[in-house]
Amino acid sequence: MHPDTLAVHMGEEPLLAPSSLVPPIYQTSVFTFKDLYTAADVTGGVQEGYSYARIGQPNADMFAAAVAALEGGPAAAVAASGMGAILAALVAARDGRAVAAADEIYGGSVALLEGFLRPLGVSCLRFDAHHPESVPAEAGAVLVESASNPLGRLSDLSALATAAHRHGARLIVDNTFATPYLCRPLEHGADLVVHSVTKFLAGHGDVTLGVVTGERDLVRQSQTALVTFGATPDPFACWLALRGLRTFGVRMQRAVDNARGVAGFLAGRKEVLRVHHASLPGHGDHALAARFLSGEGPAILAFDLQDEAAAARFIERLEMIRYAPSLGDVSTIVLHPATTSHRQLERAEQQRLGILPGTIRLSLGIERLEDLLAELAHALD
Ligand SMILES: *Cc1c(COP(=O)(O)O)cnc(C)c1O
């Protein structure tokens, strides 16, 4: 079945209430056993079943099954947040060795490496994902993003997987920006895929959740890490995420179309110095988009105005499009990376990554394109 159909139907087996059309919420922190022997077998892992909700619960399993189907992974583990998923994946994949992350990576992932793993004594390395040969040989786990934040830069996932595997390392791809609608990293050789479900997968700005999917043993180890850290999810969050996932295909289609339409519009405006979106023929990653993003650009784009003052004026003039430090919502969201998501970087480092004082990020929602263009034109005028 097409992924859009899988998103509507997978994970729907209601485990305890077979007649309900929509899965119930198992809002319980513990499960009961009918006898001592079942309890012993479930606790010992000899028999499938639920015991204690931190260890596993039906709503998490339903959502995990759906994401595994979408990404083409044999198994998935649900985390309380995207950060929980990334931590669990790194711990599972590194196998006692160093952790390496791409230079262009989500700020929370940088904080995880520099502020948490390094102080624990884990060797943390950075490299340029646009040069797969620079993947450090010491690394056991290599973390990259399928489309980077905020400029939507792409990299050659197959070459990165080959480079990581040459050193016996595992490639983890954060697929939050591209989503399985555009990119399925496991098909390009990645060992694990992680998501901030908070963004496009849940899609309605009302839930914080994460997921790890991919190779079965690594997912099992990620799940053990989540259970041990206490970073497993709440049943209601899993239920909301599965409900949000049902409309994934139509939401993504509209958002991706909107991104392409807005990119073309902005490219024709004199106030806009540069548009960063892989759908544009002049974009440096246009050829990579054909190989790794179903020939499209992501539903997120960035563009450069003259300076920070111009960016501030532009954002103040927006009415429908709101300013929020997130993405992947049904509504279009704007962000100024230099003063929010990337503020911890020195100006020079921001510049090196192409994040200028006038750079603005737009995460496209599912509004009608003509209304978005009218709003953007008004703010630019
Ligand atoms: C938001 C985000 C995360 C973190 O996810 P949370 O759900 O906020 O923990 C990780 N990676 C990327 C690319 C993100 O955009």
Image: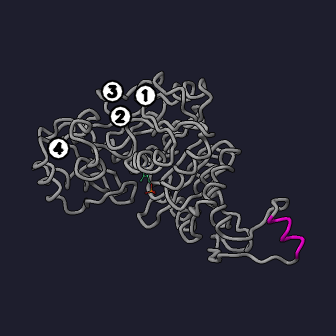
Q: Verify CB contact (< 8 Å) between mark 3 and mark 4.
A: no
Q: Earlier in the sequence, mark 2 or mark 4?
A: 2
Q: Residue at x 33, y 51 (%)?
A: 363
Query: Within 10 Å of the Cα at label 3, are there few (<14), some (14-19), or many (20+) other Cα atoms?
Result: some
Q: Which residues are magenta?
A: 36-43
Secondary element at image label 1:
helix
**Closer to us: mark 4 or mark 1?**
4
Query: Is residue 290 shown above or below 54?
Result: above
> Residue 110 versus residue 117: which sits nearer the camera?
117
Query: Within 10 Å of the Cα at label 2, are there few (<14), some (14-19), or many (20+) other Cα atoms?
Result: many
Q: Earlier in the sequence, mark 1 or mark 2?
A: 2
Label 3, label 2: how many angstroms apart (C-alpha)?
A: 7 Å
Q: Earlier in the sequence, mark 3 or mark 4?
A: 3
Label 3, label 4: how many angstroms apart (C-alpha)?
A: 20 Å
- Which residue does the numbered mark 2 point to in the structure image? 278
- Which residue does the numbered mark 3 point to in the structure image? 284
Instruction: Give the left or right position of residue 279, taking residue 271 as reference.
Output: right
Q: Earlier in the sequence, mark 3 or mark 2?
A: 2
Label 4, label 1: how many angstroms apart (C-alpha)?
A: 26 Å
Q: Identify the image quadrant of residue 345.
A: top left
Instruction: Give the left or right position of residue 338, taking residue 289 as reference.
Output: left
- Which residue does the numbered mark 4 point to in the structure image? 358
Q: Verify CB contact (< 8 Å) between mark 1 and mark 2.
A: yes
